[in-house]
Image (spheres, coloured by chain):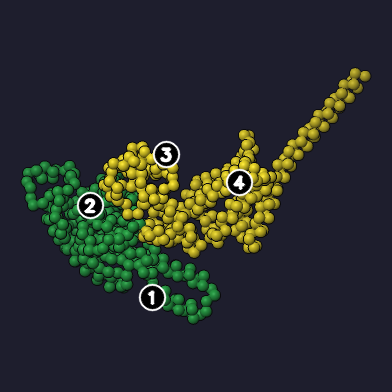
Amino acid sequence: VRLCRCGCRALLSRPAGALRALRGLAAGPEMHFGFQTVTEAERREKIYQVFESVAKKYDVMNDSMTLGIHRVWKDILIHKMNPSPGTLLLDVAGGTGDIAFRFINYVRSVRERQLQRKLKHHQNLSWQEIFESYQKDKLNSLGDSQVVVCDINREMLKVGKQKAQHLGYSEGLSWVLGNAEELPFDDDKFDVYTIAFGIRNVTRIDLALQEAYRVLKPGGRFLCLEFSHVSNPLLSRLYDLYSFQVIPVLGEVIAGDWKSYQYLVESIRRFPPQEELKAMIEDAGFFKVDYENLNFGIVAIHSGFKL
Amino acid sequence: VRCQHYPPLRALQASAVLRRVSDEHKKEPLTSSSQQHFDSHPAGHQPEQEPQGPHPSYTGQGGQESEDYESEEQLQHRILTAALEFVPEHGWTAEAIAEGAKTLGLSVAAAGMFHSDGSELVLHFVSECNTKLSELLEKEQKLVQLGEAEKKPIDEFLRDAVEARLRMLIPYIEKWPQALSVLLLPRNIPSSLNLLTSMIDDICHYAGDQSTDFNWYTRRAVLTGIYNTTELVMMQDSSPDFEDTWRFLENRVADAMNMSNTASQVQSTGEAVVQGLMGAAVTVSNAETSRAVR
C-alpha cells in the first residue's frame, strides 16, 4: 500500500468544506465519500464494504436502476474498442465480468467471420487439408485473445467467477485480485485497459491512470466508461430527482441496503466532469484523449492512447 | 463537444512511441536551427506538436513545446503507410491498419485511432498517389525545360498522365472496388472530391492549360469524366497488362480532342448559315422595294 501523499485535489466547494475546517486534521489527507468527508484510509475501507455488501445483488440492481440501459452502454464500449482477435484486455474493477464476457463474444464472432473468409479463399485444397485447417482453427476460436479481470474486492470476483461458470465462459478468461492504484502486472503487457464504472471508486485516480499507462503496450488504448456530468439543465434536474429519490429506495427494496446506494448516487455527483477527467488522462501521458457522451452526459466514454 | 486542446504545461513525460524528429529529418536544412537550440528543457520531455505543418522543425513560435518529437499526425501517417501492404489480404479495413501498427511495434489497439471502416486508409493512399503523380509530372516538365526531352502533344500527355496514375492502383486492384465504395460514403465525399479535383487540376496545369475563361472548367470536367470512366473500365478488365483499358483511354482522349474541333466547326457553320439567311433577307427586301418603286 502506497503511503498517502498530500497531493489531494481541492475538494469542490460544498457545505462539507466548512465542516472540514471544524473537524481538524485526522490521519491522512481528507477525501470525499459521497457527500461525507473522510480520510483516505477510511474511504478505501468504506468502499470495500459497500461493494462487499452489494456484490450478490450487483447485476440485479444495475438493471433496475438504469432500466437495463447499462447493457447498451457496455455494448457501445466494446464496439468502440473494436477488438481484433489476439487482443489482450485488462478489465480493471471488472468485478462481475460484464465487460469481459462481452469482449469474448465480440472476439469470437470476429474470429468466425475471419475463418469463413479464409475458407472461401481456400477453394483448391483437398478435403483432408480443409478438415485439418478447420480443426486447428476450431480449437483457436478466440484467436489467442485473452481478458484478465482485476478487482480489489474478493466478493465481486467470486460473483463474477460464478457467473462465468454459469454462462459457460472458460477459455481466455482469468481473474486476479488487485488494486487499480498498484497493479500486479509487468510493464507493457496489455493492448487495451478498460475500467467501467470503477474509476469513481478509486481513491487516487491519478495513480490508477499512471498504472494504466504503465501496463499498456506502446500503442495501447485506455478506455473508461463512467457516469459523468449532464449539461442540459432540464435533463439534469430530472436526473437528480431520479437519482436521489428513486435509486436509494430501489436499493432498500431490492438489496436491503439504502446507504450503499446513497453513496453511489453521491459519488456520481462528486466525480470530475468530462473535461477535467480528460485533462487528468492527458496528465498521465496519454495521447489523442477524447470523450463521447452517451445519453446527454449521464455516461461518458473517455479514450486515450499510449503513444 | 470534442476539442483538441493541449495546454502548454503538461506533465513532462517521455513519449513511449513518438520518435525524435531529429532521427527522421536529419537531412532537412537547418535554416531555422535557432528554433531547435531553444531547448531549455531536459532531453526526455514533452513531445506535443502543433498539428499543422509536416515539418515540425519550423513551427512552434512559443518554443515551449518541443520540436524534437514527431506529432501524432505523423505517427498516424506512418501507421497507414505500413498498413498498405496488408490491404491485398485484408482489404481496406481496420484489420489492415491493425496489422500495419503491429509491424511498427505498436499494439493492435492503435487501430482504434482511426475509423473502423478504413476511410482514412483509402484517403491516405489516394493522397499519396496524387503526390507521386505530381512529382512525376514535375520531373518530366523539368526534362522538357532542360531540353533533354521533347514536348509531348496534348493528347499523348494526357494519356500518359492518366495511365501513370491508374497504374498505381494495380497492386490493389482486387480490393479497389471496395475502396471506391468507401470514397463514396457521404462522410468522405468532401475529402475524396477534393483529392480528385486537385489531381485533375495538376494534370491540366502540367499539360500547359493557361485558359482564363470558361474553358478552364470545361477542360477539367472532361478530363474528370475520362479519368473516372477509365478507372471503372479498369476494374473489370482482365486483359494482359490492362491493354483494353489503355485502348479505351486512347479512344476517349481522341474523342475529347475531336469534340473541341467539332465544336469550333459547328460554330463556324452556324455563323455561315446565319450570314446566308441575312443575305437572302436583304435580297428579298431589295427586290420588294424595287418592285414597289416601279
CA–CA distance in space, label 2 to label 1: 41 Å
Pointer 3: what residue?
B31
Residue at the (26%, 65%) spot, across then down: A149
One can see residue A161 in this view: yes
Whether the residues at callouts 3 and 2 have beta carbons within 8 Å, the answer is: no
Callout in the foreground (1, 4): 4
Q: Earlier in the sequence, mark 3 or mark 4?
A: 3
CA–CA distance in space, label 1 to label 4: 57 Å
Residue at the (40%, 39%) spot, across then down: B32
- From what the image shows, is residue A270 above or below residue B91? above
Task: Give the chain of mark 3.
Answer: B
Pointer 2: what residue?
A206
Q: Residues within 10 Å of mark 4 (few under 14, many from 20)?
A: some
User: Disc number at residue A139?
Assistant: 1
Task: Give the chain of mark 1.
Answer: A
Q: Residue furthest right?
A: B294
